[in-house]
Image (tube, rainbow, N blue to C red):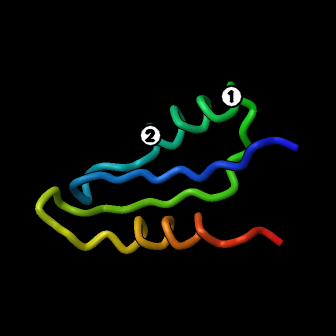
Amino acid sequence: MSRRAAIYARVSTGDQTCDNQFLCLGELAERAGWTVVQQYEETASGASQARPDLARARKDATRTPL
């Protein structure tokens, strides 16, 4: 059974995308033999404390798989 992984990517402005982060981290996971089961993407300024997708990722990470 391969290890499962999630990717969390964040950018600071709406003009940016998380595409390169997902690409690089997905390649890293593949080389390590991990299966990416979820991707989380957030656009928030560095000053913003609101990170709902990070909170969701943390919550999802604590769920017991069926």
Give the left or right position of residue 49, taking residue 57 as reference: left
Can you say which quadrant of the picture contains the C terminus?
Answer: bottom right
In percent of the image, x 72 and y 39: which residue is there?
Answer: 34
Classed neighbour count for the residue bearing mark 1: other residues with Cα under 10 Å, few (<14), some (14–19), many (≥20): few
Give the mark nearer the N terminus: 2 vs 1. Answer: 2
Question: Which amino acid type is marked by label 1?
Answer: Ala
In percent of the image, x 22 and y 56: which residue is there?
Answer: 13
The residue sitting at the left extreme is 47
> Residue 19 or 39: which is nearer the viewer?
39
Task: Tell me the number on the disc at residue 21.
Answer: 2
In percent of the image, x 53 and y 36: which residue is there?
Answer: 25
Is 29 placed above or below 60 here? Answer: above
Q: Nearer the viewer, mark 2 or mark 1?
A: 1
**Quarter of image, res 44:** bottom left
**Quarter of image, res 20:** top left
Task: Tell me the number on the disc at residue 32.
Answer: 1
Q: Secondary structure at mark 1?
A: helix
The location of residue 54, given as percent across then percent down, is: 41, 65
> Residue 22 or 7: which is nearer the viewer?
7
Give the left or right position of residue 19, taking residue 11 as reference: right
In percent of the image, x 31 and y 69: which residue is there?
Answer: 51
The location of residue 30, given as percent across then percent down, is: 70, 32
**Quarter of image, res 2:** top right
Question: Which amino acid type is marked by label 2?
Answer: Gln
The residue sitting at the top extreme is 31
